[in-house]
Image: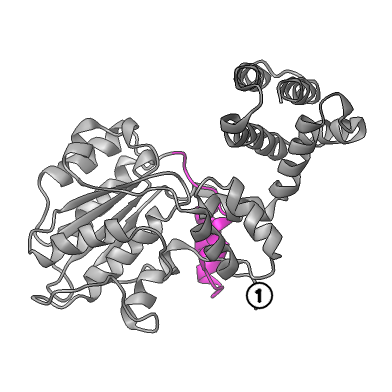
Amino acid sequence: MADEAIYPSRNPYLIGHDEEVRLFLSAYNSGALHHGWLITGDEGIGKATLAYKIARFLLAAETGKTYETLEVPVDGPVFAQVAQKSHPDFKVLERDFTETDKKKLIKAINQGEEVDDEMKQGLKRSAVIKVEDVRGVVEFLGKKSFNDNWRVVIVDSADDLNVSSANALLKILEEPPLKSILLLVSHNPGKLLPTIRSRCAKLALKPLQETEVASLLRRYKPSLKEAEVQGLAKIAAGSIGRALKYAENDALEMYENIKKICYGGAKCDGGLLLELAGDVAGDEDCWYLFAELVCRFVRDNLPDAAHPRELYEAYEATLKILDETVRLNMDKKLAALQILTGLGSAC
């Protein structure tokens, strides 16, 4: 079985959020479904996947019927229409494509090329959701429902709203049209307008268990060896999205090398130290991955550290070096050497 890329719009799998699903279904079955739902939690734990799952459920649900699950047939018309974002009562509010890449998209459509999630993934998007994009939602909600059922809008993510678009969305939440549901995905709800937060019911998703991350990795990445599955699940901090990203960029190998160097102390492999420092200095993405993984290493090892005070002080020094390296454009190789030797001395 080949590895598969699963996007939230066409992902039927949701693991680890049964409590939040029950909360939503209870509100639906009671007939008191709130018009705005704020779905929060760490990146990559299933927020958008849950939002699309709720959207499919609402668009397929029969009026007056109670339900025990959000599941809809994967081979049914609603699943396909939501996956293609073509359902007449469904809309996604997200950052639009840049003007240049929007032209590429239009050209591809006009030439009859297949336009799917993979193709769109390679296109550049605007930095924020603009007020013009929200006006499109207002227009959408102003139309009559296709079959007199729910109209559903997913905002992915609400963190991308600027001041103008946030206020425009707030107006919708304050005066929602009948049988309209807005599902707001947010990685950082503290940065949203307090009035947006107060107008929404909350679904606060928790990080996944290691076993849940591992289960999803086996499903999405069957080519991985079991040792890789277990290692990735351990360092992903409850995020399947992070685990999948790590699987693509050899993060597990980098993490293991960080461990070897830091626990090697005075006897650490100098060649490995220089090689890793050189690698992270030569590529910006590699540098940010290194920064993420050294912080992960400390959080993983601090509780059982032989010298916790020393390790915490080395961690504070690490954060300072990471900040100054980017802010002051310092030598990344030297910074990586300072970080690794500092952590090694404290371990």
Q: Quadrant of residue 296?
A: top right
231 and 135: which is toward the camera: 231
- Residue drawn at x 65%, y 17% is 310
Residue 175 position in % (x across, y down): 9, 46
Q: Quadrant of the N terminus?
A: bottom right
Is residue 269 among what the camera can see? yes
Disc 1 crowd, CA 10 A, few/some/many (<14, 14-19, 20+)? few
Horizontal and vertical percent for residue 206? 38, 48
**In the picture shown, does residue 52 fall above or below 251?**
below
The answer, for residue 281, to whether it is visible in the render is: no
69 up-or-down from 182: above or below: below
**Snapshot quadrant of residue 196:** top left
Q: Is residue 185 left or right of residue 178?
A: right
Query: Residue 70, relative to residue 135: is it above or below?
Result: below
- Inspect the image, locate mark 1, and give the three-letter code of the amino acid beneath it: Ala
Q: Nearer the viewer, residue 177 or 279?
A: 279
The count of marks equals 1
What residue sits 17% from the left and 67% below the top?
150
**Residue situated furthest right in the rendering:** 271
| Highlighted range, magenta | 101-127
- Image-quadrant location for residue 78: bottom left
Q: Is 22 in front, or is 89?
A: 22
* 45 in magenta: no
Q: Is residue 3 left or right of residue 156?
A: right
Q: Outermost residue toward the bottom?
A: 75
Magenta span contains residue 115: yes
Q: Residue 18 at what x, y percent from top left?
A: 32, 61
The residue singled out by tag 1 in the image is 2
Quadrant in the picture for the C terminus: top right
Please report the residue visible at 81 percent of the width from the left and 26 percent of the height from the top: 265
Mark 1 falls on what kind of element? Answer: loop
Question: In x, y percent, where is residue 63?
Answer: 11, 75
